[in-house]
Image (tube, rainbow, N blue to C red):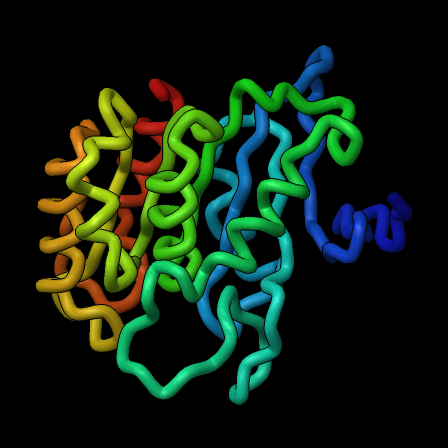
Amino acid sequence: MSENNSEKQIFDLDGWVIRRRVPKRAKPYPVMLMLHGWTGDEDAMWVFASHLPKDCLLLAPRGLYETPRGGYGWHKHNPRAWPWVDDFRPAMDAILELLKPQNLPDADLEDVRLVGFSQGAALTYAFSLYYPWKVRSLAGLSGFLPDGAQALVRNHPLVDKKIFVAHGTQDDLVPIERARESVKLLGEASAQVTYCEDDVGHKLSASCFGGLKTFFERN
């Protein structure tokens, strides 16, 4: 691990570029993993940082793949309208490797929460469906369940798992119908879903920002 920007807390770890915020509390730290959307980077999720618990170690990794429009994403570019759940397999495997004691010796890896935006929300859902025991709670913002996730939902992998979902009715990148279908499927996976819908585009409204803050204070 090498720090290269002390003010922004950017560090390199086993091939990752990660922005972090270290809490002012005793170790080990609960972990909040923040997963950006398509064309984002390690800075993109920081707009949410002030709404997340101050006692958590915030980790915002840079996506694995450069995108044709600049920035980074979580799966290789493909021509399909929507990614398949297994398109995220390399990213899920990489996150599993990241969440190891030798990489995060000061972290409480029994207390990991995920928050993802757009494509990062799709990865958050996919990871939690495959590895629910790794995740305490999660939030999907302006996101969607990847295609093929229906097969995973049938096994009820998210029993009692707390999930916050936020979406805008005017979202022109991820249609609101896709978000509503995701909420339905997450419920069928036996998750306890808190859903915030508002009249905005591909972003969070003020009320959903407040809902996100309250959700993670309680979960």
| Residue in the picture at 80% in, 48% down | 13
Location of residue 162 with respect to 15 vertically, above or below: above
The image quadrant of residue 106 is top right
Outermost residue on the top side: it is 26
| Residue in the picture at 59% in, 46% down | 95
In the picture, the quarter occupied by the N terminus is: top right
Instruction: Please tell me which residue lies in front, 109 or 206.
Output: 109
| Residue in the picture at 43% in, 66% down | 87
Image location (x, y in percent) of residue 98: 67, 42
| Residue in the picture at 52% in, 87% down | 69
Image location (x, y in percent) of residue 145: 26, 56
143 relative position to 134: left or right: left
Location of residue 181 with respect to 80 vertically, above or below: above
Location of residue 103 with respect to 35 vertically, above or below: above
Q: Looking at the image, can residue 130 be seen?
A: yes
Q: How many marks?
A: 0
141 relative position to 17: left or right: left
Image location (x, y in percent) of residue 67: 55, 81
Q: Looking at the image, can residue 194 be seen?
A: no
In the picture, the quarter occupied by the C terminus is: top left
Image location (x, y in percent) of residue 191: 21, 30
